[in-house]
Amino acid sequence: MLTDGKSVLTAAKKGRYGIVAPDFLTLNACRVFVQTADALNAPILLSFAQGHAGLISLEEAALVGKYWAEKVETPIVLHLDHGQDFDFLCRAVDLGFTSVMLDASMKEMDENIRLTKEVVRYAHARGVSVEAEIGHVGGSSEGVEGGTETDNVYTTVAEAKMFAAATGVDSLAVSIGTSHGVYKSNRVPELNFERLRELAAAVPIPLVLHGGSGTGDENLRRAVRDGITKLNVYTDFLVGAMREVRAVRTDSLIETQAPLTRGCARFLPTISILFLKPHKIRQCRPPEHPAAFSSYTAAPNEKSGSLRTVHLQKFRKVFIVKT
């Protein structure tokens, strides 16, 4: 069901579990993210970035996102990721996005506050949640592939407290050492968990971690334990999708669609399990026949059942928990 970001993230913060926010570029990706989340009974922030508006329009993203969110029982937040300007954010709100992010983190603090307050005023009047960012997560400056490379600017506790109080945002993206895109030499980043704990203790609203791809399972588990409520993931889905396409070795555009969808489907369950607390996982419906895997057929060279082999065995081990 389509819901607002504040209610989902507030519940997660209180329950000390994490919410994944995958970015979608296509109808297939949107569908598989929602259906997989529903099979896991794991709320997500289904995200679309302004930087991708050249690939799929904001209007199309709104229609597709709302359509699939309203077809399932699990709470789905339709979220605008890395909004760059006020008019675009307002359009997203008017089109039915239930959460928006203004990324003015590269601007001076006073300007970031001013712009964020404008967005908060407009969005809150229409029941839409707002995320903002201070500090700066390195990598792509637009939060998407192919952007300008920039360095990390770590979030300070004093600025985070002041910014949250001054703007009235519902969640705050902080910088503690992650980067957008792919890490060089496949290195695992070193996160500043001490800073994260200080931020979580000082700021009453949910904290967001951008650049979650390639960060490492243990880093992600610890980030949620130490105060992160929402995790943005994009590059890992791209890498997984392209890996599946290359494995098929076909020149047919049609035959690439199923592996692209598989690539997106494989990763979301794994990362969701990292974030859900055991008591939350036990409430999930065991995905013996996940809806996410029912909308396409296996590639000709794929062994029967191989799609489920790794992840669903892991699911069964996790779901069969004595209470």
Image (spheres, helix red, strand yellow):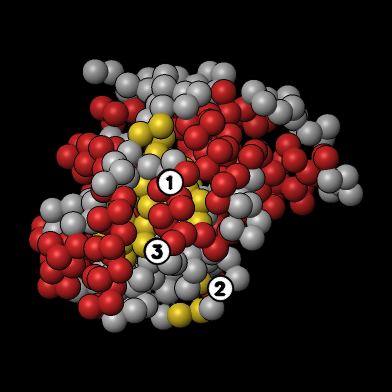
Three-letter amino acid code at the position of disc 2: Gly
How dense is the environment of label 1, judged by Cα within 10 Å: few (below 14), some, or many (20 and up)? Answer: some
Answer left or right for 145 relative to 285: right
Which quadrant of the figure contains the C terminus?
A: top left
Which quadrant of the figure contains the N terminus?
A: top left
Q: Secondary structure at mark 2?
A: loop
Residue 155 numbered mark, or none: none
Residue 255, percent across and down?
82, 39
Can the viewer see residue 305 in this picture? yes
How dense is the environment of label 2, judged by Cα within 10 Å: few (below 14), some, or many (20 and up)? Answer: some
Observer-nearest of 218 and 3? 3
Q: Residue at x 27, y 56 (%)?
A: 120
Q: Residue at x 50, y 23 (%)?
A: 71
Q: Upstream in the sequence, badge 1 or badge 2?
A: 1
Q: Upstream in the sequence, badge 2 or badge 3?
A: 3
Residue 147 numbered mark, or none: 2
Q: Which residue is mark 1?
A: 94
Residue 202 higher or lower than 60, as above or below: below
Residue 136, percent across and down?
35, 73
Three-letter amino acid code at the position of disc 1: Asp
Residue 86 numbered mark, or none: 3
Residue 280 higher or lower than 94, as above or below: above
Cα separation between marks 3 and 1:
12 Å
Of badges 1 and 2, the one in the foreground is: 1
Q: Residue at x 83, y 32 (%)?
A: 300
Q: Upstream in the sequence, badge 3 or badge 1?
A: 3
Q: Secondary structure at mark 1?
A: helix
Cα separation between marks 2 and 3:
20 Å
Q: Residue at x 44, y 41 (%)?
A: 96
